Image (cartoon, helix red, strand yellow):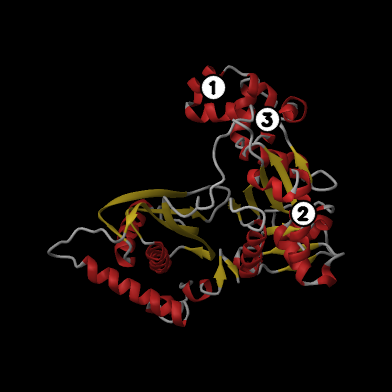
Amino acid sequence: MKDRVIFLADMQSFYASVEKGDHPDLRDKPVIVSGDPERRSGIILAACPIAKSWGVETAEALWQAQQKCPHAVVVRPRMQRYIDVSCQITAIFEEFTDLVEPYSIDEQFLDVTGSRRLFGDPLAMAQKVQQRIMEKTGVYARIGIGPNKVMAKMACDNFAKKNENGIFWLTRDKLETHLWPLPVHKMFGVGSRMKRHLNNMGIRTIGQLARFPLEKLKRKWGIPGHILWMTANGLDASPVTPGTHDTQKAVGHQMTLPRDYADEKEIKVVLLELSEEVGRRARMKGYAGKTVAVGCRGADFDVPTGFYRQQKLDEPTNDAMDIYQAASRLFDRFWDRLPIRSIGVTLTQLQSDEEYQLTLFDNQYKKRQLGHTVDMIREKYGATAVIRAVSLLPAGQALDRAEKIGGHYK
């Protein structure tokens, strides 16, 4: 089978790049995109290359970044704007191929195998894509090219991001010379824990993993061990699938609280709001779920506490009160009565919400119709057009959350 040509396009310091594109006066300044420290979201979401040259790192605390770069311009995130630009970039990719698969808000795969006759060789095409994104959005794209998705990803992460032109083509004949000498943690799919395991086995480079006996890896880790070996050898048959995120295995919502919550009544307010949001998201996707899960983290970083537990329901549901009642039972059972700083609710074992069991004592049809009606009102008049009375209490977060996307203001 002839090799495909796959791009993995990564937007450099995406949020910060969007801010610089929208505000030319920031172009030559160190820009940091960070949440609000007063609401416990003071974490660096993005830092431009100038800020990074001062040692600023993504995911560190804002106060740490400001110590390293006191003159940095701190910008609050505008999540809706970043989503809009990401969609704009997707539209640019679709000018080159119809096989575009979003990997994250700032990374997307493109299968351009069939586009070479129109746009030239892969390197020339990558330059055209890069130039078009810069012209339309002001964002600089780094592009890794490979015969499959994992090689394109590793080409981008390990080489394109370090190249002056931001493009690198990792062909199979470069595996031994370029990829295999790299430390094993540079391989896609190897995190800090797996790195320790592999190092303890004497595997310190990607090449050593590629040459390690496959059967030993399979005996130790099963299918994941086989996947590690395949990745190290540049093998990946997975297609670039535009609709890969159209189906879900779970619907959930988690939030970090603006302060420590120790009172059960206050926690239950947030738990109800989370259940409401999970139900809304499930209905929006046309799902009902048969398992409810609850997780929380304690407020003390030095002595980690918390839990994650789930409960199977008698019937699939996307009703807020059904979800809340199950979540509340789980919380009552497993909470250690210590203050918490974050909490989440998840609905799993999803199926179509058009299928449900009729019962004598519970009108599922009526509950689902009511849920969809409330969703329509909120869609037309805003997320706060209909809210529960408890959300008006000091513990409530629904009004504040309605102004955010992904935990950050729109």
Residue farthest to the left? 360
Please identify, in this view, whether the residue under mark 2 or under mark 3 is nearer the observer: 2
Residue in view at x 74 percent, y 62 percent: 16
- Crowd tier of the residue under label 3, counting other residues whose Cα lies within 10 Å: few below 14, some 14–19, many 20 or above: many
Q: Is residue 327 left or right of residue 304?
A: left
Q: Residue type at mark 1?
A: Leu
Camera-nearest residue between 334 and 146: 146
User: Do tag 1 and tag 3 residues touch (Cβ < 8 Å)?
Assistant: no
- Crowd tier of the residue under label 2, counting other residues whose Cα lies within 10 Å: few below 14, some 14–19, many 20 or above: some
In space, the residues marked 1 and 3 are separated at their CA atoms by 15 Å
Q: Which of the 4 quarters of the picture holds residue 36?
A: bottom right
Camera-nearest residue between 110 and 380: 110
- Which is nearer the N-term, disc 2 or disc 3? 2
Q: Which mark is residue 128?
A: 2
Q: Which residue is mark 3?
A: 184
- Which is nearer the N-term, disc 1 or disc 3? 3
Q: Residue type at mark 3?
A: Val
- Give the x, y percent position of residue 40: 61, 63
Camera-nearest residue between 38 and 210: 210
- Does the image show residue 201? yes
Q: Which residue is mark 1?
A: 217
- Give the x, y percent position of residue 74: 75, 67
Camera-nearest residue between 303 and 73: 73
